[in-house]
Image (cartoon, helix red, strand yellow):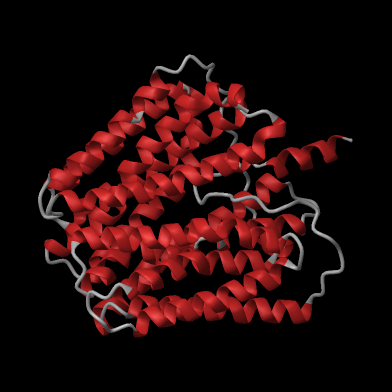
Amino acid sequence: MTRYLLPIASLLVSVTLLLIGHGLQLTLIPLRGETLGWSAAEIGLTGSTYFLGFVVGCLTIPRIIARVGHIRTFAVLAAVATAVILVIALSHTLLAWLALRFITGWALSGLYMVIESWLNEKSPTQLRGAILSLYAMLTMIAIAAGQLFLAQADPSQATLFIVAALFLCLSILPVGLSASTAPLPVHSVRFRPKQLFKTSQVSVIAALLGGMVTGSFWALGPLFASSHGLSAERVGLFMTAAILGGAAFQFPLGRVSDRIDRRIVILVLTVLGAGASAAMSSFTATGSDWLFALAFLFGATSMPLYALCVAHANDNLTDSTFVEVASGILMMNSVGAVIGPTIAAPLMSLFGPSAMFAFATASYLAAAIWCAVRLQAHAVGRDHFQPYAPLPETTQSVIDLDPRTVAQETNLSR
């Protein structure tokens, strides 16, 4: 195992540095918007533009990589992301933030894509599952580690933005100095919504609604925590608790879904997610440590949903490839992340911070009802063809790293 990890060690170091900086800015930016006196609707809109930029990046960055290569693309996009976070620290207008957050999402999608396609090419077939799991774990650990810097300075000052920019900039070094041969260009993937919906109606709707919830949480969760009397440091711990909840339950839920109808697991998860969201929405205590326990439960029920949707869609493959279907589920999740904050943020402005989790409750209940209807309408009488894998919500390039991709390609070649 060690001899296979050494050639990709520089990529994993780059991913860790990149996501520490990115994790910090994910929470820092809503807090900074709050200090500027912006409404929840305005801050939520900046979150939506970030996810919109991410979607556009997934569609456009492969052409850039094909023209100039992986290393140059990574260096340029990291420089762009670094510059943008510094400009955000100096900007005080909403219009500027909307443009800058869009660029950040676009650049981050490309940075993910370069690293993930590189990992894919350097990963031997027999270790793809282990490397994918390691990568998924590193992403969560790094994003959680970024939250810890919130204790070191006031979000209203430029210090934390400089720290985030420093990590983004440092992520260039391991990739830029890597002696590994750069991989082949990234392939663009077809997105056929009708075919995708025909393949797995449960996965499409659950991924869309789940993206609406997680997109709202990343854009507006810090405002909710701040409204409950948490300092910037404790807001970071609140976000960390949710991330750790997602990390803790990814594998157990995945293993359970390998043994029973995955739709039952998705149904139970959305019902529990609705319950956790309702508990958050009705929580009124100020500065209570119970808020962190609820955040952990919310993360445990929300963050594993996307990977379960991909696994279930893979169970239903007929005339589509796993890469196409998984990329389509990712796109539906990303579209949900664009839509979610634009709905949840005005609700927060009208009814208060708890409205965000009321919106999450309604979204999960809608997903649960849809899943229950499909369970009654369509019985599954066959085993799952491929096991669950902890697929991160990043770009379509990580799907190529999934061992299920190789398994299907092998079957098709026979």
Residue at 20 percent of width and 60 percent of height: 232
Q: Is residue 220 visible?
A: no
Residue at 20 percent of width and 55 percent of height: 95
Q: Residue furthest top?
A: 179
**Residue 158 percent across, percent down from the top left:** 12, 46
Question: Does 162 sit above or below residue 265?
Answer: above
Residue at 50 percent of width and 65 percent of height: 300
Question: Does 185 sit above or below residue 203?
Answer: above
Q: Nearer the viewer, residue 12 or 39?
A: 12
Side (left or right) of 162 relative to 74 = left
Q: Nearer the viewer, residue 210 or 104?
A: 210
Question: Does 20 sit above or below residue 281?
Answer: above
Side (left or right) of 59 relative to 187 = left
- Quarter occupied by residue 208: bottom right
Side (left or right) of 159 relative to 45 = left
Q: Is residue 118 visible?
A: yes
**The N terminus lies in which quarter of the figure?**
top right
Residue at 78 percent of width and 42 percent of height: 408
**Residue 343 percent across, percent down from the top left:** 37, 73
Q: Residue furthest front?
A: 289
**Residue 246 percent across, percent down from the top left:** 49, 60
**The C terminus lies in which quarter of the figure?**
top right
**Residue 273 percent across, percent down from the top left:** 51, 74
> How many discs mark residues in the rendered view?
0
